[in-house]
Amino acid sequence: MSKKRVLIVDDEKNIVSSLTGILSDEGYEVSTTSDGVEALEIIQKYPPDLVLLDIWLPGMDGIEVLKTVKTYHPEIEVLIMSGHGTIDTAVKATKLGAQDFIEKPFSLDRIIQSIESALQAKHFAHPEDSKPSLALKELPICFELMVEVKKAIKSYSKNMKPVLLLGETGTGKETVSQAIHRQSRKGDRPFIKLNCSFRQKQAIQSQLFKRKDKRLKAEKNPSSLGQKVVYLSNIESLNKGLQEKLAEALENSNGGLPDSNFEFLPVRLFISSSKDLSDLAAKGQFHQGLLEVFKETTLFIPPLRNHAASIPAIVKDYLEDTRISQNISVPEIGEEALTALCGYNWPGNIKELRSVLERLILTCANQQKINAQDLPPEIWKPQNLIDIKNIDDAGSLQEAELIWEKHFILHHLKRNNWDIEKTCKSLKTEKKQFQEKLLHHSIDVKEIGNIPSQPRYPQRTLKRSVVLCGSSLHSGIKTGLILQPMPPGSGIIFGDIASGKTIPAKLENVQSTDYSTCLKKGMVSVGTIEHIMATLHMYRVTNLLIKIGDEAPVMDGSAKDFCELMEDGEFEDQDDYYEEIVIDKNYSFGNKENGEPYISIEPSDNFSVSYHMEYPEPIGIQDYTYEFKGDESFKKEIAPARTFGFMEEVAQLTKMGYASGGKLDNFILLGDKKVLNTELRFEDEFARHKILDILGDFYLLGKPIRGKIKAYKSGHTQNVGLLKHIRENLMEKIEVH
C-alpha cells in the first residue's frame, strides 16, 4: 500500500523539522514549504492526502490558502495550526472546510491523532477513493475478553463468506464486522455501512447490484465485482423483494442472478439484526432463503450483562485510551463507581457503557476521580440495592427463597423502568411465565411502579458538526458557534473553544440574569445563551456540545439563524429515550397584584406560553400565546422575533459595558414612540420575543416540560426564579444531565 502524503506549510523551522521527523517515522511521505503560494503550486503538481497549514504565512495567509485548496481540491484534508487562535479564526477555518484547528504549542501526539482522524474521515467521506488502514486491526478489549467471539472473528477472517451477526442493540455487531473485514485478505477494500431502517430501497440496491455492461468484460470493468465490502444493519427492515434478490445472488457463487441483467457488486457482505430472525421467518416476515444462506456463518454477540466481569477492564482501558489518543487529563474511576457500573444491567450494552464513559470524561474533567455520585441516576441509586427487609420473617428455606425472588423481581423491574417486556428480556424469561410470577407475588406493576402516562421520546443530536459566525451583542467581539454531536445522556454542554473546558447547561450554573442568561462554572463562563437554548428546546435536541467563546453570537437578534444552522446539521434520533417534565400543580414567582413582573405554570396536556406586556409606545399592551405543535410552529411563530431596546436604555447599557455589539441590524431600536431602524416582522413581535427568552431559560431544566406558562412582564430573573421553585419540588422527576 502506498504511503499517505502530507504537506507541511509553516515558516517556523523548528516546528517543520520536528513534524517532518515524527511523521516520517510514522510512515508518512512528507514534503514542506514556508510559503502559501508555493504550497498551492506543490498541491497542483503533487496533490497530498493532507495539508498541515499554519495561519500566519508570508505572502498569502493560511485562510486564503485553505479557501483555494477547498475550491479546487475539496478531497484534500486540511488541518489548521496557529499560535494566535481565536474563536473567529477557528470558526472561519472550520466553515471553509478545515478538518481540525490546532493551537500552538501542541504535542506531537495531538498532531498524529488529528492526522489519523482526518484521514479516517476522508475514507468515510470518499469510500470509493480511499482504503481503510490495515493498521487498525486491534480488537477492542471487550471482544478480546469474549473467547468465543474472538475465535469466530479469527475464523471468519480466513474466508470471504457472508456473515450474519445477531445480538441486542449496542452489543458491537458493526465493530465485530469491521474487525473480521480488516483481518481478512481483502481488508483494504472500502467498508460501506447501510442502515436498512433509514435507507430507501433504491439507495441500498445501488450499492449491492449493478446493471451488466455487455460492451465490457466483467474482469475489465472497474465498477464490477470485488470493489467493496457492504454492511447492512437492521436487515429485517430490508424490502422483501430485495431480500429475495439478495438471497439469489448469495446462493450463486459467481455473484450473478439467474436470467437477470444485474450483477452483485460487494466482494463480501455482512448483515446484522437485533431481532429473532428465525421467529420472523416462521411468521413470514423475513425471507427464509436469505436466512439459510447464513446457516453456517451466524455469529451471536452476547449482551454486556453476560460478561459483567469484564467491565472493570473495559472501563479502565477506555479511560486510558482516551487519555492517550486525545492527550487530555482523564480522571480515574473510583471503586464505588466501578462497583455500580458492574452491578448495572446495561440494556444498551457496550454502546451504552461507552456513552456513559464519554459523558463522565466531560462532566468530571476537573476532578481526579469519578465517584459513584457522578454516575447517571439509573446506574447509581442507593435505593436500587436489594434490601430484603422481611428475610428474618422466613420460617423456612422455601419461604426465604420466595421472599428473595419477590425482591429480585422488584429490583429488576425498577432497573428497567417498570417495563415488563424489557425486564423479561434482561432476565431471559418468557413473558407468560414472568406474569405468572407477578400474580403469585401479588405484584401490581402499574400501582407499585407509579408508571407515568406520558410517552417516551428518542433523545436527539445532530448528524454532523456545523459552524456559525457572528458578533456578540453585549461584548461586541467577533464570535461564533461550533455545534458537535454528542452521545445519548450527554445533555447540552457549552465548551470554551480556547481552553477546551466545559460547562453543562444546568440551572445551578446560572451566574446572572442581567439583560441575558449567563452560565459560569469555575473559570469558564458563557453569556446570552437563551436564543440557542430556545432553539434546542423546540427542536428537542437533547445532546450537543456547543463550542463557543464568552458569548453566543446575536445574529439578527432572533433565533432564525440557529434554526437554519441546526437543520443544516440534520437531526439524528438516538437509541436512548427521555420523558417530559410534567407539571403536577401550580407554581409561581413574583407578585402580579402589585404590578410587578410575574410568571406562573400550571398543569396542562400540552406545552404553551402566554405573555402579557405593558410598555411605553410604540409597544403598548401586547399579548401572545404560543402552543408547541412541533419545530415548524416555533420556526414560523417565535424564532424570527428579535431583541428590542429603547434608545435611552441602549445608551445606559453601553455606559455599563453592555450592548457593545448592538448594531442597527441586530436588534429593534425604539425611540420617539416609534420603531427607528426596521420594519416589524409581526405586530406583536415584542411579546413573541419575550416568549423566545422563556423557551430558552426553561430548557435549563434539562428536558422539555409539559405545562401552561403565563407570564406578566417577566424577564430572565423571574424565569430562573420560577425554574428553581419547580426544581425544588420536582427533583425526582427531573433527571439532570
Image (cartoon, rainbow, N blue to C red):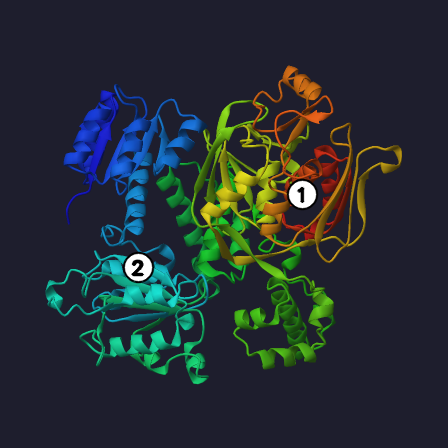
34 and 138: which is toward the camera: 34
Q: Residue 310 got which mark?
A: none
For label 2, the residue is: 192
Q: Residue at x 31, y 34 (%)?
A: 79
Left or right of residue 123, residue 615 in this image: right
567 and 579: which is toward the camera: 567
Q: Position of residue 599 (x, y in %)?
A: 78, 40
Q: Residue at x 37, y 68 (%)?
A: 201
Q: Residue at x 53, y 31 (%)?
A: 553
Left or right of residue 146, residue 675 in this image: right
For label 1, the residue is: 698
Q: Amino acid at mark 1?
A: Phe
Q: Secondary structure at mark 1?
A: helix
Q: Are marks 2 and 1 in contact (CB under 8 Å)?
A: no
Q: Amino acid at mark 2?
A: Ile
Residue 563, picture quadrant:
top right
Q: Earlier in the sequence, mark 2 or mark 1?
A: 2
Q: Is residue 737 visible?
A: no
Instruction: Tally the numbered discs.
Output: 2
Q: Position of residue 692 (x, y in %)?
A: 65, 40
Residue 69, picture quadrant:
top left
681 and 163: which is toward the camera: 681
